[in-house]
Amino acid sequence: MRHRRFYTATAIAIAGSVLLAGCAGGGDAKKIEDKSADFGFNNEGLPIVDDTLALTFGGTKSPLAPDYSEMELVQQWEKDTNIAITWKNVPEQVYAEKKNLMLASDELPDVLYNTGLTDAEIVQNGSNGTLLPLEDLIKEHAPILSGILKDRPDIRAAITASDGHIYTLPSVEELGLVQYPNFLYINTSWLDALGLPMPSTIEEYRAALEAFGTQDPNGNGKADEIPLSFRTDSFCANPNDLIAALGGQPENNDHRIVRDDTVEFTANTDGYKAGVDALGDWYADGLIDPESFSQDDVAYLSKGKSATPVLGSFFWWELKEMVGDDRVDDYEMVGILEGVDGEKLASVANNQEIGRGAMAITRANEYPSATMRWADRLFDPVMSAQVNWGPIGVTLEEDENGILQQVPAAAGESEGERRQKVAPNGPKITTQKDFETVVAPEPRAKERQDLVAEYYAPHKANDAYPPVLLSNDELEQVSFAATDINTLVKEKFASWIVNGSVNDEWGGYISQLESMGVDDVIATYQSAYDRFQQGGK
Amino acid sequence: MTTETPSRILFPGKPASKPGRVRSHLRRALHSWQLYVLLTPAVAYIVLFKYWPMYGAQIAFRDYNPADGFAGSPWVGLVHFIRFIESFQFERLMVNTLTVNALGLLLAFPVPIVLALIVNQLQSERFKKLTQTVLYSPSFISVVVVVGMIHLLFSPRSGIVNNAIVTFGGDPIFFMGSPDWFRPLYIGSDIWQTAGFSMIVYLAALTAIDPALHEAARVDGANKWQRIRHIDIPGIMPVITILFILAIGNLFNLGFEKVLLMQTDLNLPTSEVIQTYVYKAGLQQAQFSYSAAIGLFNSLINLVLLLTFNWVARRSGQSSLW
Amino acid sequence: MTHTLPTTPARLVESSPSDNRLLPPRPRKRGRFGDRFADPLFNTIAIGALVLAMAAIIYPMYFIVIASFSEPTEILNGNVWLWPQGFTIEGYTRIFSDSTILRGFGNSVMYTVLGTIISVATILCAAYALSRKDLYGRTFFMLLFIITMFIDGGLIARYLVVRDLGMLDTIWAVVLPGAVGVWNLIIARAFFENNVPGELRDAAQMDGASDFRFFFSIVLPLSKPLIFLMIMIHLVANWNAFFDALIFLDDESKYPLQLVLRNVLIQSEVTSAGGTGALDSYAAAQRLGELMKYGMIVISTIPLLIILPFMQKHFTKGALLGAVKS
C-alpha cells in the first residue's frame, strides 16, 4: 500500500513536470527591410540621417568607463551623424553572465559594440540569423573600410566566416608586440657579484642559475634564492623559449605552430620531449621554483619585490611590473639563448593583432545602412586612434610633423586609467604604417617594440597560426578534443618536470594523444589555414 | 476563529472501506483545508520558479541554439550523454568526484555533531555564545579568499605550515603541487569553513530536548558522557538521519568554484571533477547542451542515491524524507 | 493568544508517559562516579577541543584583518604573521571612495530583511503542513519538492520565466526566485515532526482549536529555536547572495552591497586586453585587487558578526518543551 502510493505520487509528480515543460518561444529569422530612408538617409556626407535616428547599442566597456553617452568623443559622433545612441554597455565580467541570456531571450540591442563574442558565438549567431551579414553593406556604405580591406586581404580573410559572410567588424592594432610576450630577464647584479658573464647560451644560463642557487648571491646566509620562476598558463610568463633552446623546436601556449605553411602540433615530438626532460633535470637540481606550477599572477609578481631580493631569473613582458621601481637596474633582458644545437629560436605566440568581435549588427536593427555608415567613420586612421586612446585634445595631440602623440597623464592618474575613461574602444584599424604616419605608439609600447626588434624578431623560428575563423563544424570537432588534449598536455608537462618521469610515461602519453584525435585536430587546423591563405590572395 | 469539526476526532485517519475510499480521501483532504492553505505559498513558489523553468532541461537532449529557442533547437536524443560517458575523462571524473565527496562526508559529517554536543554541555552562557560566534564566522568568508589563504599558508617557501615543518627538521612539502594533498586540503578547509554553521542546526535540535530529562538523568547519577550518549544523541538522531540522507543525495555535487581555484597543473590527477570539467568544456564553446546533459546525468545519480538511502533509512526504522 | 488555552500544554505534559520530570528535583547524590571523575574529564576534553578549534579558526580570521591593512607583496612573501606589514589603508580608501557603497548597503538590508521574512514564513508554514502525518497527499507534495533539488531548468529558462512574470529589474527578482530552499524545508519539517508531540495537537483539537490556530498560537511560539535557526540561515544566505541580482537587475542603483563590492573589485583589477597600450596598470591593479579582497571580507562580514550573536540567546536549552511547562 505504501509502495503503491509512493509510485503513484512519483508518477504524478513526473507527469506534472513534463506537462509544465510545455513549449517555449522560438526565434524566427525575419527578413530585414532597411528603413534608413524613413529618417532621411544620406548616402554621402554628414549628417548620416536628416531626422534624428535612435539606436540601442549593447556590449562590454571598461569597468572604469562612464556611460558612453557621457564621453566627449561619443557626443561628438552624435552631433556629426544625427544618430542618437542609447548605450547599454556593461563591464566584461557582468556582460559575460548576461550575454547568453540576451542572445537567448530575444532582447537584442540594434548593435553589439565591443561584442565580447567568441569565434564560436560569431559563427553560431551569424549562421542562425541573429547577426546580419555585413559584406554587402560594407561594399555599399563603408568606403573607408572597403579601401582598407582591399589593401589588406588578410584582414578581410580574418573576419570572413567559412560561409563567405562577414558578421563582425574588426579591431586592429599592429604594434608587433603580442607575438613575443615572454621576455626573459636575469639578475645582473647577482651575475656581477658572482663574477659571471651575461649568459648567451643555454649552458651558460644553466650555470648561472646553479650559481644563484648555491652561492648565496644576496648574501644573507640563507639559501632563499629562487634561481628561476615562471608560470604555465599566463599570457607572458611561459618558458616556451627555454623548451625551444633545450629541445630545438619552437613552442607556444597552444602547442600549435606554423612552419613553411604546415601546421604542427608541438607537444608530441622528440624535441618537446628533450626540452621537458632537460627542464626536469633543472628542477631536480633546484633551479626551478616549485610554485611555477601553482602560483597566480599576483603571487608571481610579488616574488620580485620581496624585502630581500630572492629572484634570479624570470619571464614577464615588463621588467618594472615584476621587480618594482627600485630594482629595475639590477636586471637585464636575456632574450633568446643559443640552444643545445647551436641555434637561437624565438618562439612566436599565436596571439592576434586582428580582433574580430569589435562590432556586429543584429537582426533587431531596422537601419543597417545608416548603421554601417556610422561605423565606417571609425575606420578613418585618425578616428581609429581616437577610438583607441581618446579624443584629440584630451589624450592625443598633433606634433610638428602632424603625428598624434600621447598627452602625458596628469599627476595621480596613469595613462592606462585615463584611456579607459575617455576612449570607447570598438571598431578601429591602426596598421603598422599608421603607427609611422598617423599616431605614435605610446612610449612604453615603443620601448617594447625596440626590445622585440633587438632581442626576438631576428631569431623568429616559426609563424603564428593566423586568425582564421573556423566553421561551426570545425569548431565543434576541435573544441571537444582540445579540452582533453590541453588538459593532458598541461598536466603531464608539470608532472614530468617535477617528477622527472617523462621517459617512463612518454609512450602512453603519445598513444593517449592519438586516441584523443590530435591528428584530426591538426588536420582541421591545416585545412582552415589553407582556406585562410587562399582567402588572402 | 473556526469552530472545530468533530469529525477530526471521529476520523482518526483509519483507511476507509473500499467503496467509500475516493469520497473519504476527498473528505480527509477537505477536512484539513487549512493545512493546504499553509502549503499553498510554497507550492506556488516551486511551480513558478522550479517547474515552469524545467522545460529548459530539455536542452540536454537537443543541440541548443539560443536563436531557435528551446523547442526550436534540433532534437539529438542521448548524443550528449553518450559523448560524456565515452569521453576519456569519464572514469577519472567519476572516481575523483565520488572519492572527494565520500571521504568528505565521512570525515566532515560528524564534526559539527561533536561540536554541537560539546557546546551544548557548556555551563557558561557567555563562553557558549563566544564559541558559537567564533565557530561559524568562517562561513562568511568567500571561497576565493579561503583558497587564497590555503595557497599562502601552505606555500612551500613562505607558508607558515612549511616553516613549522622545517623548524622541526622536516623537508618542506609542496602541498598545492601534489595530487596526494588535494583531498586532505579540500576536505580540511571545508570542515574549517562549514562545520561551525552546520553545528547551529544540531544545536537548535539539541535545545528542543527537555532539560528535565537531563535533570532526571543527573539525579540518577549519569555523567555527561552517559547523558550525551543516552539523551542527546537519540534526541537529535532524526535530524542527523535527515541531514545524512540529504548529504548522500548530494554525493556527486562539489563546490566547483573551490575545486577550480585549488587546481594546479600538478594536482589534476585528483582534482579534476565532473563540475570543473563541465565548466571547462562549456568555456571552450557555448556548449549549453553538453553541460546541461552532464548536469542532468549528475542529478540522476544523486536522485538514485537519495532514493536508495531514504529507503534504507525507512526500512531500518529511522526517519525518512517522506 | 495562548492564554485562551491555558491548561492544554500542562495537561499534555502530565499525560505523557515517560516521567517523573515534573517532580521537584531530588537532592543530588554526591560522590557518584559521574561527578567526581567523568565530568571533569569531559569538561577538560571539551574545553580543550573547543579552544583548539577556536584557535584554528581565529588565527586565519585575524589574518584576514591584518592582511587587509598590509602591503600585498609582504603578505605574499610570507612576512605577515602577527602584525600588518607595510601598513596601508589604501584598500579601504578605495572601497569607501566609491559612492555607491552606501546605497548598496541600504539595498542589501532591504533585500535581506524582505527576503528573509518571505523565506522563513513560507518555509515554516509549508514545513508544518508537511510535518502532519494526516496531511492527505503528503508523499506527493514531498516528492514535488524533492524533485526540484535534482532537476533544474537552467539559467536561461529561469531568466525567461522571471522576465515573463514581469519581475526583471525589480526587487522581486532578487527576493523571490531563491526564496524556498528545499533543504531548509526538510530541516524545518523534521523539527516539527520530532518536537511537536501528536498528543499536543489532539489535546488542542479537543479544545476546539483549528489547524491555523494551533499552528500560529501554539506551535510557532514553541518553536523559537527553529525559527531563529531559519532566520539565521536566511539572513546569512541573503546577505551574501549576489548572483540573482547580477542576472536580473540592470539598474545599478538597485545593486546589493555584494554586487557593488564585486564591481569595485573588478574596477581595480582592470587589465588591458593583452599586448597593447595600458601596460602600466596591470601589476598595480593586481596589487590593489589583492588589498581590497581582504578589506571587502571585513566590511561585508561585520554587520553579520554584530547581529548574529543577538540571535543566539534564543538557543537556550529546552526552549521548546521548557516553554510548554511554564
Image (cartoon, coloured by chain):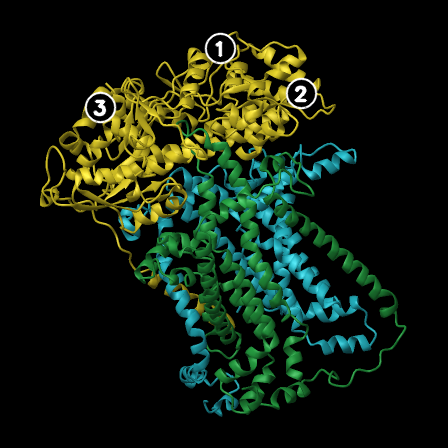
Q: Residue at x 70, y 18 (%)?
A: A214
Q: Amino acid at mark 2?
A: Asp
Q: Which of the two residues, A113 or A503, is positioned nearer the viewer here?
A: A113
Q: Secondary structure at mark 2?
A: loop
Q: Residue at x 85, y 78 (%)?
A: C28
Q: Are marks 1 and 2 on the same chain?
A: yes
Q: Secondary structure at mark 1?
A: loop
According to the colouring, which chain is green? C
Chain A drawing hue: yellow
- Name the chain letter of the residue that bears numbered label 2: A
Query: Mark 2 — residue?
Result: A285
Crowd class of label 3 (few under 14; some 14 to 19; many from 20; radius 10 Å):
some
Q: Earlier in the sequence, mark 3 or mark 1?
A: 3
Q: Secondary structure at mark 3?
A: helix
According to the colouring, which chain is cyan? B
Q: Quadrant of residue A15?
A: bottom left
Asked if the residue at tag 1 contacts the one at tag 3, i.e. Cβ–Cβ closer than 8 Å, the answer is no
Which label sits in the foreground, 3 or 1?
Answer: 3
Query: Mark 1 — residue?
Result: A344
Q: Are marks 2 and 3 on the same chain?
A: yes
- Name the chain letter of the residue that bears numbered label 1: A
- Name the chain letter of the residue that bears numbered label 3: A
Crowd class of label 2 (few under 14; some 14 to 19; many from 20; radius 10 Å):
few
Q: Left or right: A113 with respect to C235?
A: left
Distance between the alpha carbons at the discs numbered 1 and 2: 24 Å
Q: Left or right: B237 with respect to C266?
A: right
Distance between the alpha carbons at the discs numbered 2 and 3: 54 Å
Query: Mark 3 — residue?
Result: A148
Q: Amino acid at mark 1?
A: Lys
